């Protein structure tokens, strides 16, 4: 997920695929746009720089720290909502907005979140095992591991981390808590996984997949993505653009499938000679970071940008 280079030196980050994502979403400079993952405002600032005076940008983020950072943008064309982007339709309706010209989503976790040990996202630092993007609600990763059944822990790590040793890791987590020392810190989980995972992928910490899985589960990221894509489709006017950056295959697969589902004509098998239902989206492309961007920002290496454009065909109600 992107953040702005103007972020404080302590948690600085460079926005991934900045120009490509903005180029992809911007269909008309005087339109209304949604940055559904404000982060630290990298994409929002780039969009505002290209919007006409009549344009409007609505930022959304469920991280209170990101919402607070948005106060630095003093622009009458910009407003910020503390919300999950899955709820963008309801948030915009409350502002009197029922149609937009573009929705940009930069998925995953931002560098300010990763690099702050107190947030608990990274195994590289010792900190509380939290991982919540919205720290005002929900249960932390530590709470989940302290309460969940062994089979549920294994399912989360296998499904969301694609971890081969999910069952063994879950068994070790439960054995530790039954011994009276439940996991509460990131370094404790990292050490437990390192002892449990017997083979390691070259260049990857053995805890990588487990941390990813717990973060996705705690934040309901895949459910939010699916709800957010549907909300964006309902909001986009004809010619409006959807621009989505993913950072792992679970996300990208869902974005790809969503665009594919809505960018093909649908035939009614009950009426084989009838005209097919018109397509709702036109897939415009898939973009990966350049070699130069990856060299300058290694966190960009797994990013995939997909862009689609709304047609004028009506949505089925």
Image (spheres, helix red, strand yellow):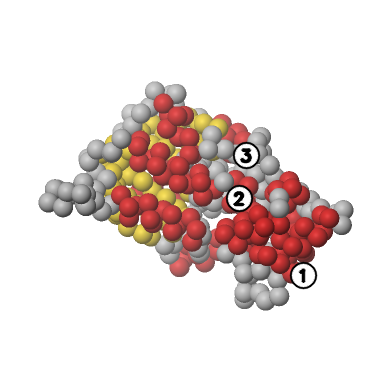
Q: CA distance from mark 3 to mark 2?
A: 13 Å
Q: Position of residue 238 (x, y in %)?
A: 25, 39
Residue density around tag 1, few if under 14, some if 14–19, many if 20 or more, within 10 Å: few
Q: Position of residue 64 (x, y in %)?
A: 62, 35
Residue 93: quadrant of the picture:
top left
Residue 33: quadrant of the picture:
top left
**Label whose residue precedes the other's in the sequence (3 or 2):** 3
Left or right: residue 141 compared with residue 88: right
Residue at image point 66% right, 74% down:
200
The residue at the far right in this view is 180
Left or right: residue 138 compared with residue 56: right
Residue at the disc numbered 2? 217
58 or 175, which lies in front?
A: 175
The count of marks equals 3
Residue at image point 79% right, 51% down:
184
Residue 195's tag is: 1
Residue density around tag 2, few if under 14, some if 14–19, many if 20 or more, within 10 Å: many
Look at the picture and state if 34 lies above or below 130: above
Residue at the disc numbered 3? 134
281 or 151, which lies in front?
A: 151
Look at the picture and state if 137 lies above or below 161: above
**Label whose residue precedes the other's in the sequence (1 or 2):** 1
């Amino acid at each position: 997920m992107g953040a702005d280079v103007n972020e404080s030196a302590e948690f600085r980050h460079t926005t991934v695929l900045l120009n490509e994502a903005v180029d992809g979403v911007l269909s008309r400079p005087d339109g209304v746009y949604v940055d559904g993952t404000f982060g630290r405002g990298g994409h929002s600032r780039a969009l505002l720089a290209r919007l006409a005076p009549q344009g409007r940008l609505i930022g959304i983020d469920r991280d209170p720290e990101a919402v607070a950072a948005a106060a630095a943008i003093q622009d009458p064309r910009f407003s910020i909502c503390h919300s999950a982007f899955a709820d963008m339709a309801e948030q915009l309706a409350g502002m009197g907005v029922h149609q937009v010209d573009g929705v940009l989503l930069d998925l995953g976790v931002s560098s300010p979140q990763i690099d702050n040990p107190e947030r608990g996202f990274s195994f590289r630092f010792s900190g509380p095992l939290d991982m919540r993007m919205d720290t005002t609600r929900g249960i932390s990763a530590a709470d989940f591991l302290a309460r969940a059944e062994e089979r549920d822990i294994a399912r989360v790590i296998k499904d969301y981390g694609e971890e081969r040793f999910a069952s063994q890791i879950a068994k070790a987590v439960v054995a530790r808590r039954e011994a009276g020392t439940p996991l509460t810190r990131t370094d404790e989980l990292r050490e437990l996984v390192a002892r449990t995972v017997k083979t390691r992928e070259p260049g990857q910490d053995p805890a990588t997949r487990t941390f990813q899985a717990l973060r996705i589960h705690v934040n309901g990221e895949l459910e939010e993505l699916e709800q957010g894509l549907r909300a964006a489709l309902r909001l986009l006017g004809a010619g409006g653009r959807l621009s989505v950056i993913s950072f792992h295959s679970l996300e990208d697969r869902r974005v790809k499938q969503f665009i594919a589902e809505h960018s093909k004509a649908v035939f009614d098998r009950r009426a084989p000679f009838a005209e097919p239902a018109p397509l709702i989206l036109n897939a415009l492309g898939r973009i990966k970071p350049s070699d130069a961007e990856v060299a300058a920002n290694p966190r960009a290496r797994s990013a995939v940008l997909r862009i689609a454009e709304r047609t004028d065909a009506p949505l089925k109600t």
